[in-house]
C-alpha cells in the first residue's frame, strides 16, 4: 500500500552506496543548472526571481515520492513561463502584487486540474497533441521567448503585440540601445556559446551568473544605467494556501488548462523518449498527472509557479548518471542552501538582467526544431502544413491560440483521413500466389470477370458513402456484363457499425440484381461476429460468401471448391456452442 501511494519509494529497493554517489553527483549538477535557469524563467514569466528558486525546491521533493520516472528533472520550464506571461499579462501588470497573486492561484489551479485528470485516468489526453503540433508550437514558442528577452538585451523598452513587431520596433530604436547593456549581452551570449561548443560539461550559466554579479558589484553597473536584480528575499516563504479570486476564475481556467496540458505533454514526451526495454518499471501517465498535480499544488503554497519536466535538464540528469529521484532531493537541497544563505549577496553584487536574458535565450535555442521541420517537410506535406499553421498562429496570435488551432487542424485531418481512407484494386502477381496493389507492381494480372479490392480503415457511418462510391467506380471500369464476382479484402477493416451494415446490405442486393456476387475475405474475429449477428447478412455471409484468404475465394469462384470456408466462419457464437 505504501509503494502504491508513493511509487517513488520503489526506486529505493536495492539502493546501494554506488547508486547514492551517482545520485549526489548528478543532483549537484542539476542544482547548479537550476539556480540561474529557475531565476531566469521566473523573470521570463513576469515574476520575481525567487519564485523560480522556490519552484525548484518544493515541487521536485514531492514528485520524487509520487512520480514513476527516474529520468526526468522537474522544475521551472521556459514554455510554462511564456504561457504564464501571455495568459496573465492581460489580467494584471507583470510584477504587480495582483499579478503575483494570480500566478500563485494559477499554479494551484494547474495542480488541481492535473490531479483531477490523473484520478479520472485522463492520461490518454496526451494523444491529442500530434508530433507536428508539438514541433510547430515549441518552435514558435522558442522564438517568442527569445523575442521577449530582446528588451533586456538592448536596454530599450517598446510596446508591441507580437514578437515580429517587437523586433521591428527595436530596430527602429537602435540609436537608443544602451551600450553597456548590449556589451554585457554580447559577451554573455558568446561565453555560453563557446562553452557549449568546446566545454559542454562546464556549468557555464552558473559561472556567468557569479562572475557578472562580482563585476556588477565592483563597477556599480546599476549606477551606469544597467538594469539589475538587487533584491532576492532570504529564507523560505511561509506556508499559505492561496485564495482563489472567483471573479477572475473564468479567465484563469483557460490559461490553467493550457499550462496543465502542455506541462503534462512535455513531461510525457521526455519520459517516452528516454524509455528503454531494459527499464525495470514503465512510466504511468495517470500517476504522472497525479504527481505533477500535487507537486504544483504544494508549490502554490510556497509561492511557486507551475513546474514540469525540462528537456535540457533531463538530458543533463541522464548524462550525469542519475539513477533515482534522490538526485532531485540533492538539487533541491543545494538550492535551499542558496536561498537561505546566499541571496543577501544580491544587494552588494546585483545581477544584470541582460545576463539572465542571455541564459534564457541559450537555454531555449534547442526548442526551435529546424531539423524536425525539414524532415517532416520531406516525409509528409499534410503534416508539415499542420506544423506550419501551428507555428504561424502561435507566432502571430499567441501560444494559447496556436496550440488550440494546431489541435483543431490535427483533428480535422484525422477526421478527413478516416472518412477518405486508402482504397485500392488488387491483382495477382505473375508467378506468385499473392495479390497486391495494381498501382505498385508492373508484373501483375487483373481478371475482367473478378474485381478484388481492399479497404484500409474501419467501416463506419462517416466513410460508408466513400466505400460505396469507390466500389462502384471500380465496377464501372469493367466491360459491361463481364464482371461476375467482387472480392473485398477486409483484413484492414477493424470494425463495422450498424450504418455500414445497412449500406453493405444495399450493395449486396444491388450487385445481385446485376448478376454479381460479393465475397468477403480475411475478416478479423470481431467483424465476423458483427456480420453473423446481423439478421439481414447472416445467411448471406455464411452461405459460401466468406473465406479466409483471397485464393480461397478465387478457387470457389472458379471451381466451386471451399475446403477452408469453415475457418472464415469461426465466430464467438460458434465457440460458445461448442
Image: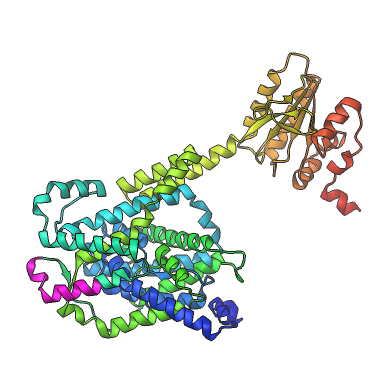
Q: Residue furthest top?
A: 480
Residue 78, compared with residue 60, is above or below; it is above
Question: What range of the chain is rendered magenta?
Answer: 209-225
Q: Residue at x 43, y 50 (%)?
A: 135
Q: Is residue 223 magenta?
A: yes
Q: Residue at x 45, y 72 (%)?
A: 320
Q: In which quarter of the view is residue 485 placed?
A: top right
Q: Is residue 421 visible?
A: yes
Q: Residue 297, how many percent across, how many down? A: 41, 73
Indicate left or right for 511 with 103 as reference. Answer: right
Q: Is residue 233 magenta?
A: no
Q: Residue 470, how many percent across, how many down? A: 65, 27
> Which is the main secondary structure of the residues drawn in magenta?
helix
Indicate left or right for 271 with 252 as reference. Answer: right
Foreground of the two, 529 or 360: 360
Q: Residue at x 21, y 49 (%)?
A: 166
Amino acid at each position: 500500500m505504501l509503494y502504491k501511494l508513493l511509487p517513488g519509494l520503489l526506486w529505493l529497493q536495492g539502493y546501494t552506496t554506488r547508486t547514492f554517489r551517482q545520485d549526489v553527483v548528478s543532483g549537484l549538477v542539476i542544482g547548479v543548472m537550476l539556480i540561474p535557469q529557475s531565476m531566469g524563467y521566473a523573470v521570463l514569466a513576469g515574476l520575481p526571481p525567487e519564485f523560480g528558486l522556490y519552484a525548484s525546491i518544493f515541487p521536485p521533493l514531492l514528485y520524487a515520492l509520487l512520480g514513476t520516472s527516474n529520468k526526468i528533472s522537474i522544475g521551472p520550464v521556459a514554455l510554462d513561463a511564456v504561457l504564464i506571461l501571455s495568459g496573465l499579462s492581460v489580467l494584471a501588470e507583470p510584477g504587480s502584487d495582483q499579478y503575483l497573486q494570480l500566478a500563485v492561484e494559477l499554479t494551484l489551479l494547474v495542480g488541481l486540474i492535473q490531479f483531477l485528470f490523473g484520478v479520472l485516468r485522463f492520461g490518454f489526453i496526451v494523444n491529442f497533441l500530434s508530433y507536428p503540433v508539438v514541433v510547430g508550437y515549441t518552435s514558435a514558442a522558442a522564438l517568442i521567448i527569445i523575442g521577449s528577452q530582446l528588451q533586456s538585451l538592448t536596454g530599450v523598452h517598446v510596446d508591441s503585440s507580437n514578437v515580429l513587431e517587437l523586433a521591428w520596433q527595436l530596430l527602429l530604436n537602435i540609436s537608443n540601445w544602451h551600450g553597456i547593456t548590449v556589451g554585457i549581452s554580447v559577451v554573455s551570449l558568446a561565453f555560453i556559446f563557446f562553452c557549449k561548443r568546446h566545454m559542454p560539461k562546464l556549468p557555464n550559466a552558473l559561472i556567468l551568473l557569479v562572475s557578472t554579479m562580482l563585476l556588477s558589484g565592483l563597477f556599480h553597473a546599476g549606477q551606469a544605467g544597467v538594469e539589475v536584480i538587487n533584491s532576492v528575499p532570504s529564507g523560505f516563504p511561509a506556508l499559505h494556501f492561496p485564495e482563489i479570486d472567483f471573479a477572475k476564475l473564468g479567465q484563469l481556467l483557460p490559461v490553467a488548462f493550457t499550462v496543465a496540458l502542455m506541462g503534462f505533454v512535455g513531461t510525457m514526451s521526455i519520459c517516452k523518449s528516454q524509455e528503454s526495454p531494459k527499464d525495470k518499471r514503465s512510466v504511468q501517465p495517470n500517476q504522472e498527472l497525479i504527481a505533477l498535480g500535487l507537486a504544483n499544488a504544494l508549490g502554490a503554497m510556497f509561492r511557486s509557479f507551475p513546474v514540469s519536466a525540462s528537456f535540457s535538464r533531463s538530458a543533463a540528469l541522464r548524462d550525469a548518471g542519475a539513477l533515482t529521484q534522490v538526485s532531485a532531493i540533492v538539487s533541491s537541497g543545494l538550492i535551499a542552501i542558496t536561498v537561505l544563505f546566499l541571496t543577501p549577496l544580491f544587494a552588494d553584487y546585483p545581477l544584470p538582467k541582460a545576463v539572465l536574458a542571455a541564459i534564457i535565450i541559450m537555454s531555449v535555442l534547442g526548442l526551435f526544431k529546424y531539423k524536425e521541420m525539414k524532415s517532416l517537410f520531406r516525409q509528409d506535406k499534410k503534416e508539415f502544413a499542420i506544423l506550419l499553421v501551428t507555428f504561424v498562429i502561435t507566432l502571430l496570435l499567441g501560444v494559447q491560440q496556436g496550440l488550440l488551432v494546431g489541435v483543431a487542424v490535427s483533428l480535422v485531418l484525422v477526421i478527413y483521413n478516416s472518412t477518405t481512407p486508402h482504397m485500392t484494386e488488387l491483382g495477382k502477381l505473375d508467378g506468385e500466389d499473392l495479390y497486391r496493389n495494381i498501382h505498385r507492381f508492373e508484373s501483375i494480372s487483373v481478371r475482367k470477370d473478378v474485381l478484388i479490392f481492399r479497404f484500409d480503415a474501419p467501416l463506419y457511418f462517416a466513410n460508408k458513402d466513400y466505400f460505396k462510391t469507390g466500389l462502384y467506380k471500380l465496377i464501372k471500369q469493367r466491360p459491361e456484363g463481364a464482371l461476375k464476382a467482387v472480392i473485398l479484402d477486409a483484413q484492414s477493416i477493424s470494425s463495422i457499425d450498424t450504418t455500414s451494415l445497412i449500406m453493405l446490405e444495399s450493395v449486396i442486393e444491388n450487385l445481385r440484381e446485376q448478376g454479381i456476387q460479393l465475397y468477403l475475405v480475411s475478416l478479423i474475429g470481431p467483424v465476423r461476429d458483427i456480420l453473423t449477428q446481423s439478421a439481414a447478412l447472416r445467411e448471406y455471409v455464411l452461405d459460401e460468401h466468406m473465406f479466409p484468404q483471397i485464393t480461397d475465394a478465387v478457387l470457389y469462384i472458379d471451381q466451386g471448391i471451399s475446403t477452408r470456408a469453415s475457418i472464415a466462419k469461426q465466430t464467438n457464437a460458434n465457440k460458445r456452442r461448442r
